[in-house]
Amino acid sequence: MHRTQIYLAPEQHKSLKQKAAKKGVSLAQLIREILTAYLKQNEGLEKPAGEIYMGLVGLGQSGLSDVSARHDDYLTEVLKNDHHG
């Protein structure tokens, strides 16, 4: 690991310390977890399911005639099924 020093506003420090205490982890560990989640979400380390499915739009034929009008309904159905399976 690399040591990094940062400055936090007093309210940020207080809030993070409280959250770390509730989770039973150190402030440093909580900050690492927050940064990991941020990087996964915002820098493509792990694409959210919606991004993956949107990349597939238009690649095949569904045989359905109303996809352009009901695409949100179909995408919602696929995403719901993905989270339950």
Image (cartoon, rainbow, N blue to C red):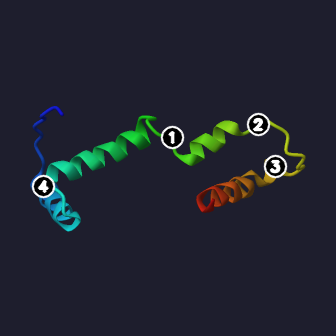
Residue at the image point whose x is 14% and y is 60% from the top: 17
Disc number lying in front (1 or 4): 1
The image position of residue 65, as x and y in percent, is 90, 49
| Residue type for callout 3 | Val
* Whether label 2 touches label 1, CB < 8 Å: no
Cα separation between marks 4 and 3:
49 Å
Callout 2: SS: loop
| Quarter placement of the N terminus | top left
Return the residue at label 2.
58
Q: Earlier in the sequence, mark 2 or mark 1?
A: 1
Return the residue at label 1.
47
Q: Earlier in the sequence, mark 1 or mark 4?
A: 4
The image position of residue 9, as x and y in percent, is 12, 51
For label 4, count other residues whose C-alpha is less than 10 Å away and answer few (under 14), some (14-19) or many (20+): few
Callout 3: SS: helix
Return the residue at label 3.
67
Q: Nearer the viewer, residue 33 or 70?
A: 33
For label 3, count other residues whose C-alpha is less than 10 Å away and answer few (under 14), some (14-19) or many (20+): few
| Residue type for callout 4 | His
Q: Earlier in the sequence, mark 1 or mark 3?
A: 1
Residue at the image point whose x is 80% and y is 47% from the top: 68
Cα separation between marks 2 and 1:
19 Å
Residue at the image point whose x is 61% and y is 62% from the top: 84
